Amino acid sequence: MAKLKAAVIGLGMGYNHLLGYLEHPDVEVVAVADRRNDRQERVRALCEEKNIKLYCEGIELINNEKVDILSVAVPNDQHMGLTIAGLEAGAHVLCEKPMAMNAAEAVSMLETAKRCNRKLGIDFSYRFKPQSFAMKAMVDSGEMGKIYFAESTWLRRYGIPGLAAADFNTSSSKGGGMGSWFFDKKQSGGGPLIDLGVHRLDLALWLMGYPEPAWVMGSTYAEIGPDAAKAQGLEYSVEDLACAMIKFKNGASLQLKASWAGNIKENELQTTRLIGTKGGLLQKNINEGYTYEVEFFRTENGLPLDCKLHEPAPAAPSAYQCFVDAVRDNTDFLVDPQDAVTVMQILDAIYESARTGKPVEL
């Protein structure tokens, strides 16, 4: 069987896509594209070693290379255009999160994938953790009973992309953070809600079985980010904290919180909690980092029983490995693109509710 030809557009987050494809035995990476000269230098030697073509513009790559798999890992405002172009050129597309700037763009992407009979995957990478797989198995086995409440959180003390902690001092020297597109609403579509909250929202919904949302009530705040950006000579046009209550048609509810900056103890706090009629689950990050543990709580013989899961083995496959396997074997990818559309619809509703101060029905 001939190897699948793959390409990657965007070498920030896309660098992980590139490494993932290079590790897969059934893939040949033929091209990458990135506008940033500094990132091009980082991969130039690798491209020469692996005989990979290096483009500046993603659309140029799409127009000149015939590939089976295309990763799109660029600022959010470019997701729809490059994804649709890739699908129409015949590629199966794995797009970074969030799926798009809004739900309307996400629907256009999904409709194009269906029309072109191509697979469309969204990199909700927090599903692809061994602890997440273990939690999903416990939920699906019925050990939790009916899940009626969940809360999912990603909060940072100081962590606005492109602004270091020192930048929160208004005496900092002016400059431009490389990640400043994250807090430009025209490029990002939103702040930590669409950047961090999207991960924790998808993880909770996936574990809950993606119940159909009924209404959303949300709030957003920009209390720290604007001054921090101004000290660097930059404009800040998104929130730095968002929170929401999501009510589902099956009666369950979910609380969601996301922030880049706030006066909390932890530098980085990530939690997803599920409460069911038979048991409860809690996933949290360890030592404020990017490793995780899971605890399970239930009552047995009238006594409270708490358990901690050992590290599941083997390690979970990456989204890139799973997407290649789905294309190669013509099977379903772990992330249904309709799930990603639902996430965008909820995010849109949270922003609308925050704007109007009223609940939004879905």
Image (spheres, helix red, strand yellow):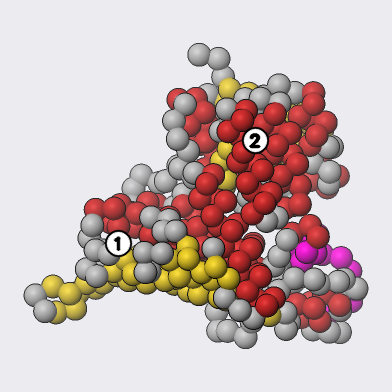
Where is residue 197 shown, x and y percent of the image? Answer: 57, 65
Residue depicted at x 50% and y 75%: 245
Q: Earlier in the sequence, mark 2 or mark 1?
A: 2
Q: Nearer the viewer, residue 303 or 81?
A: 81
In the picture shown, does residue 361 fall above or below 6? below
Q: Is residue 273 visible?
A: no
In the picture shown, does residue 92 fall above or below 206? above
Does the magenta segment cover residue 30? no
Direction from residue 294 to residue 7 in the image, left or right: right
Q: Secondary structure at mark 1?
A: loop
- Labelled disc at residue 236: none
How would you classify the magenta stretch by its main secondary structure?
loop
Direction from residue 294 to residue 221 in the image, left or right: right
The magenta span reads 172-185
Residue depicted at x 87% and y 71%: 234
Check disc 1 and report the residue beneath it: 309
Residue depicted at x 86% and y 79%: 231
Q: Which-is-in-front pick, marks 2 and 1?
A: 2
Residue 233 image-quadrant placement: bottom right
Check disc 2 and report the residue beneath it: 112
In the picture shown, does residue 36 fall above or below 84? below
Q: Nearer the viewer, residue 26 or 211?
A: 211
Where is residue 322 shown, x and y percent of the image? Answer: 48, 37
Q: Total number of numbered labels?
A: 2
Q: Residue furthest left?
A: 301
**Alpha carbons under labels 2 and 1: distance apart:** 41 Å
